[in-house]
Image (cartoon, helix red, strand yellow):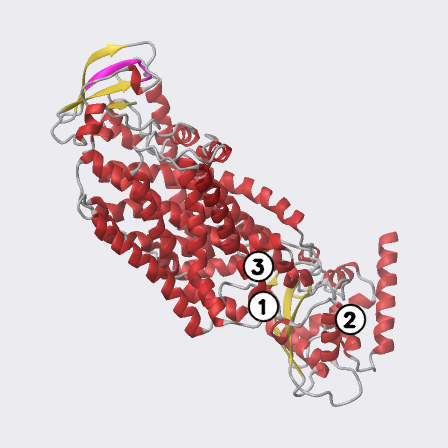
Amino acid sequence: MKHWRRTLVILIFAWEIVDAVSTISRPENILLDLLARPFAPTEGASNECIRDSKIYFAELRKYNPWALQMYDASAKIPPGVISGNIQQLGNYDECLQIKTDQNFIAQACSASVQFEILKGPRRSLELDMKDLLLQVAKAANLKNVPDNSVDYEWTWCVPSTCNHSEISEALELALDPLKIDGRLDFAVSVNANSCHTVVTDNNKFDIVDWSYIGVLLTFLTIIISSTTYDLYAKRKAEESKCKDVKHSYLISFSLYSNGKNLLSTERSRDMIGCLDGLRYISICWIVYGHTFYTEAVGVKMDRSRIPKLHEDWSSLLVLNGNIITDTFFLLSGILLAYTSLAKSTKEANSSVNVFNLYLNRYFRLTPAYAIVIGFYSTLFEKLGSGPRWNIWIHSNKLDCRANWWTNLLYINNYVNISNICMSQSWYLSVDMQLLWISPIFLYPMLKSNKGALFWIIAITGIILSVLIPFFVTFFLKLTGTMLYYKSMQDVTNVYLQIYTRVYARAGPYIIGLSFGYLLFKTKHYKIRISTIYIICGWLIAITAGISAILGPRGMYFNNHPYNKWEASFYAGLHRHIFTLSVSWIIFVCVNGYAGPLNAFLCWRAWIPLSKLTYSAYLSHYIVLLYNIGSVRTPGRLSTFSALHAFFGNLCLTMFLSLSLSCCFEMPFMILTRLILTPGRSKDKTELIFGSTNSGEGICRSSEDINNSSTSSVNSVYAISKNSCSVYDLDIQTATAGKIIESRDNLNDCGSFTPTRPYYLL
């Protein structure tokens, strides 16, 4: 009873205020009149809407509980408007759960009202809406109103017989007295997808949804069958370890084997250990940056804090955090160069199999990618609800259903980018496009007599990757990077012309190819550098890296005039500078000059986590969009709240990526390797000994290293640590011969010194 009494007191008090001031045309009174009264349609609305609205108003005057709930669930004038509390979502769940005794149900509709402040003199002594908006901005300690406009969002609980256009017309009519010719205008928008009822939120499945479910069930059947077969085969420990190709195909989808390989902390001797730590730290930075972004654009009570973020130096780690994606381009280039050179040296083959290169990358990455796109297009929308659910989730569904093909062709950073499916997927397209042009660099790189040509092409590519962003920024008068809250049009232009373009990202990738080439060529040499040079290198790398991140801080200040030279130089150089700083870290780690940092980055716990980075990149936005789409009430923006959200998002992302990797990414990686490289001796060895990923890599004899050719060798030794035995392996027939030697301890290659190449299993 106390609850109802408080409600009645509030209602009566609010209506008395409205009645008392309704004849006064001051802007705050007009807004109070609009938000304190229940929704009333215009005369041009449908008969059903007018009839049911009158019923609602009459029942409200009788204090009917369901009418009181509808009124209570609608937006009111909130506290904290000056600090940026401009989004009032009402009580969404209360509205949808209302059960009336009439022929309609309640629906929650969100309206966006954008006030546009025009340049013009005041025409009377009376204050108008422009004065109110500007003074509110002044009270909020804002230097100006961004883009001369202020956006408000209000949610009303109205009869379901009123459609979105009728609600929009009612709001426009109620706010019309606020318009001042040449001084203030406004636009009201009520999208059809912004209206929700308990019926519309109960999503129905269509043919696309059922098709996707069918695909998932098919894969589930394959995974269960593969895992069952794998576990059954493991019980046959007493049988020969010789396995045929069919066995590897059958266990490719096994959760047991894939999970075991995923969680393995073994690292190949030829691998660059510090890359594991860098890769996982980079994905964490990306998840944190995207978390902060979704927190900032979400429903917040203190939005006025956002235009002042740049005043805190640490905020640049987020505001300019997109630079971390260039670390992935660097690592991608390093690994491509390093592994290509290793393969070429092992197989004594300096040619580039472009067909295999493209197919291998496409079929390793695309299946998991396609599964996530399918999820966006079908089931994601059905997993939640909220007043802003359609803004974030439904819109992604429509974009993915319309433009999925641009994603799978890896051209969505150029085609229909304004309606891109999965906003973070531009990176995958750029990375694939860089792979498409990589043979230009790989061909001279792999030729022993073409080293000079490689460096000429690489240096030319790096110079072009500096000049093209420079001139695009200069002639289009773009900002040096995306200055997120200064001008949305400037942000959009940089995103479309620079941020997502392959020519702007080619520099870090080519630097990675060049650095990978140097690392491979010097891996058998001990590089000695004096302490003074190491210290100078660290000082230069740290200063350059921090400058690249913090460089655009001054551009955020309103009193900082636009300088196209400053913007152009920053746009052309900052990614290369940051990439070279990261390259220094890798260099000192590889050559033993990083001390504790190398131990940290090479920590074996990073290995399983680094294997999940691709799946994490694909899936992390699912968690972020769910959170921002299902929000019900305004929150507060702070570093602590962002960190709190980040750790929760990261844990959920790791869980999703674990499932995605074991079920789709790793199986197709195995299948791709089996199909595209059926004749490689290492694959045959793995098939014989029942291992698809030993994790130990190849240990080569001294003769093999000196000779650097195995093409004339018909057999090799294979050392099995599991059975503590050395086998004579025939490469041509892929059959294991007699046991050459058996010992109790074969933990390293030094325990057995053959005269021919050998493999450690």
Q: Magenta residues, as a range?
A: 721-728
User: Splitting the image into 4 quarters, where does residue 141 fall?
Assistant: bottom right
Task: Return the residue at label 1.
Answer: 486
Residue 724 is inside the magenta segment: yes
The kind of residue on which mark 3 rests is: Thr
Tag 1: amino acid: Lys
Image spot of residue 312 (x, y percent) = 64, 56
Q: Residue at x 82, y 68 (%)?
A: 61
Which residue occupies 76% across, 61% down? Answer: 72
Residue 84 found in image quarter = bottom right
Which residue is depicted at the point 27% across and 22% down? 689
The residue to which callout 3 is attached is: 200
Q: Nearer the viewer, residue 205 or 100?
A: 205
Residue pointed to by mark 2: 37
Q: Which mark is residue 209?
A: none
| Label 3 crowd bin: few (<14), some (14–19), many (20+), radius 10 Å | few
Residue at coordinates 59% horizontally, 42% vertically from top-left? 647
Q: Residue at the bottom extreme?
A: 123
For marks 2 and 3, give the CA distance.
26 Å
Secondary structure beneath disc 2? loop
Q: Nearer the viewer, mark 1 or mark 2?
A: 1
Q: Nearer the viewer, mark 1 or mark 3?
A: 1
- As measured in the structure, the alpha-carbon distance from the residue carrying label 1 to the one carrying label 2 is 36 Å
Amino acid of disc 2: Arg
